[in-house]
Each structure stands twice: as structure tokens, then as C-alpha cells.
Image (tube, helix red, strand yellow):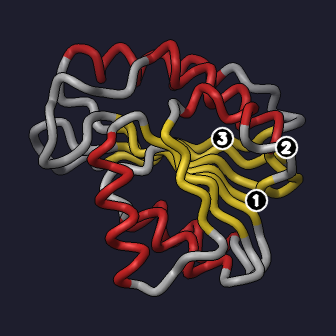
Amino acid sequence: MNLAKAIAINKLRSGDTVIDATMGNGNDTVFLAGLVGKEGKVYSFDIQDIAIENTEEKLKSANIFSNVKLIHDGHENIDKYVNEKVKLVMFNLGYLPSASHEITTKAETTITAIKKSLEVLDRDGVILLVIYHGHDNDKMERCAVEKLASNLDQKEYNVIRLEFINQMNNPPLLIAIEKR
């Protein structure tokens, strides 16, 4: 979703540390690495071998090596790998395009990942959740994410939800959580 990328461009500076919580085909990992530059750091998570392979190939094509750590693990384990404050965490929830639709992000692990992301999120940092909700599991995940986000303390977080109202077939929505 271009709005999520626009927020990332506005928030990030060279040298920042970020997390791509759902590596997928590597597009966001490469995008974020470009924004934080060689002085920054990107932690990128996925459970699928094909995601790691696709992302490695994209990073090689973009000549990006030193500042990206590809992690073959679920985003619910962020705390095992990230021990520093981050400026941004990006999630694309759903399934990996052009791969099995049976393998999707799940409400339980996503909620755990969001809670752990909130712990490492720096002041004025943001969590971006692009939610694709085309089938039953995705709808449950959307409800769980919306419930968590809507119950965050307004004194600590600003939370917005942006969604298309003129598109059919379950268009994605964006939830952004900014730490005050």
C-alpha cells in the first residue's frame, strides 16, 4: 500500500533501525534498506524458505548486503533477535503472493509480534500494519489487530486506520500505531 510507504519515507532517516516483520518477496526489505542507508539496520522476518530466497535475490540485485539481517523465523520471535530501539516496524498481513495461500499470518502470532514490537519501538516510531483480509483466517486476524490497536492507551500511542471505501473484493487496510 503506497500510503504505508509514504509514512515510512516521512518517518525514516539514514542510520535508523527498522523491522520488516513479514519479509515476503523482499520488496519492503529492499525499500526499507534504501531509506535507512548503509548506516541503518533492517531486521527482516519470514518462516518460508522461498521468502528468504526471493529476498536474497532482490538484495543482490539492489547491491544491498551489509545492513540487512534476514531471519528465518516467525515475527512473534522479534525479541530473540532485536535488542535495540527501532523507528519503524512494517507488517503485510495475509499470504505470500505467488506462493501457497494455505500459509498465512495468524492472529495469535501477529498479536504477539505487535506487542513485542511496541516494546522495542522508539519514541515517535511507528508500526505499519497493511492488512489483507480476503479469507476467514485473515478476517479473524483483522479483528484481533483492530481490537488490540483500539485499546492502546491514547496517552502513549496515536492509532489510525485508513481503508478504501470505493473498492470491491476486500481491499487492504492500513493501521498505523505511533508511539508518543
- Name the mark nearer the viewer: 3 or 1: 1
The answer, for residue 129, to whether it is visible in the render is no
Which mark is drawn over residue 87? 1
Gap in angstroms between the C-alphas marked 2 and 3: 24 Å
- Label 1 sits on what residue type? Lys
Work out whether residue 180 or residue 135 is closer to the camera in this orientation and state it.
135
Q: How many marks?
A: 3
* Label 2 crowd (10 A; few <14 / some 14-19 / many >=20): few
Q: Position of residue 77 (x, y in %)?
A: 64, 28
Confirm or deny contact between disc 2 and disc 3 (CB under 8 A): no
**Mark 2 residue element:** loop
Q: Where does label 3 land, which residue?
A: 159
**Mark 1 residue element:** strand
* Label 3 crowd (10 A; few <14 / some 14-19 / many >=20): some
Q: Quadrant of residue 116?
A: top right
Position above or below: 115 against 107:
below
- Label 3 sits on what residue type? Val
Q: Position of residue 72 (x, y in %)?
A: 49, 40
Q: Position of residue 63 (x, y in %)?
A: 46, 86
Q: Quadrant of residue 82?
A: top right
Give left or right: position of 69 versus 118. left
